[in-house]
Image (spheres, grey):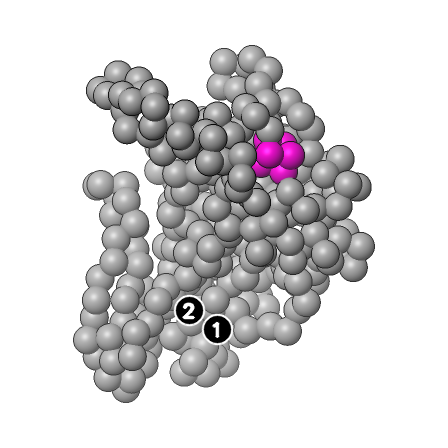
Amino acid sequence: MRVVRCYHDPISNKMMEEVIEMTHEEFITNAQIKLKNTLEKSILNLSNANYQKRLQTMTVTDTAKEIIKQEYKTPESIYNGPYTKTALFLLPMLELTLRNEKIKKYLVNAYLDDIAYEHDYTRPIFLLFKVKSFAEPEYKELFKFITTLPSFRIDYDLGTQEFIDPQNNWPTKYNLVMMVYETPEKWKDDYYHFKAGRYSRFSSEYKLKFPKETLDKDNKRVESLVYGVIHKTAYRKDQVAKHFCVKNDKGTIKDLQEYEKNRKEMDGWAEIWECADKKHEYYNYCEEVK
């Protein structure tokens, strides 16, 4: 079989793909060897005793899944940057928000699923957190809150991964923890509207959870990206229409007629933003071609 492995190239800072030819038996063998050589030290040194116990009793299938979990980074979207649409649109269903400073500090991203984690949860939302030390007072406070939410189901460790420490701008190892939640029944329809890309069809009550304005990098008030998408505002349509136009070296639109054509067409669109896709919204997403 051919296995397409997705990985992050630190030099180009891009997501890359590598096609590997191997039999099923070779895949399992390689997974076991890599687990022994590269994961044993990093995972067994974790303080979480339950995770260590589970590692010792892993099946062959579990072993392969642990390999896939290592150093996974969600590719950035040209539309919503480093955050997934799950993070931008679904956190309010859990009574959480990216505007909270503790959430912004510790949350890596949110996902609709973790490909390598078997479960039978209904309408799941996966939140990936990073922390240098589990003893940090702010993290302990956040952990206590997010694990006592009614929608919380389980958490599991994902080893360690390097991130840039904002305090010294230096690569630093962080512990990774995934929290799993189930979307409350109240927001069931909104959850499925999101998965289908029907953002403007969110319920009136759910739309109220998104403020109209936010602060940009210069601390100026601007229309919120999510608000514009949900309400299909003229400003957001303008921005999307400009995005698809050919620009010169200075970033100025070359052909105004092209922009006017794009903008006019958008008034007939059912939605003005792309639908959530597995590549960005599923943790550990990687295609396997047989």
Q: Is residue 142 left or right of residue 278?
A: right
Q: Is residue 120 visible?
A: yes
State whether residue 73 is above or below residue 65: above
Mark 1, residues whose alpha carbon is within 10 Å: few (<14), some, or many (≥20)? some
Tags 2 and 1 touching, CB below 8 Å: yes
Q: Residue at x 45, y 29 (%)?
A: 263
Name the one closer to the observer, 119 or 262.
262
Q: Is residue 62 left or right of residue 24?
A: right
Name the one closer to the observer, 208 or 169.
208
Q: Is residue 251 left or right of residue 259?
A: left
**Position of residue 45 measured from the top left corner of the image (x, y, whole percent):** 45, 60
The disc at residue 55 is 1
CA distance separating discs 2 and 1: 9 Å
Q: Label 2, secondary structure: give it.
A: helix
Nearest to N terminus: mark 2 or mark 1: 1
Q: Which residue is mark 2?
A: 66
Considering the whole magenta stretch, tell me its main secondary structure: helix
Where is residue 169, by image quadrant? top left
Q: Residue at x 41, y 61 (%)?
A: 285
- Which amino acid type corresponds to the residue marked 2 in the rendered image? Glu
Task: Residue at the far bottom: name it.
Answer: 25
Image quadrant for the N terminus?
Answer: bottom left
- Which amino acid type corresponds to the residue marked 1 in the rendered image? Leu
State whether residue 139 is above or below residue 1: above
Find the magenta span and give its range.
Answer: 227-232
**Position of residue 234 measured from the top left corner of the image (x, y, whole percent):** 57, 25
Mark 2, residues whose alpha carbon is within 10 Å: few (<14), some, or many (≥20)? many
Image quadrant for the C terminus?
Answer: bottom left
Q: Residue at x 49, y 19 (%)?
A: 217
Residue 231 lies in the magenta stretch: yes
**Position of residue 61 measured from the top left corner of the image (x, y, whole percent):** 43, 80
State whether residue 213 is above or below residue 283: above
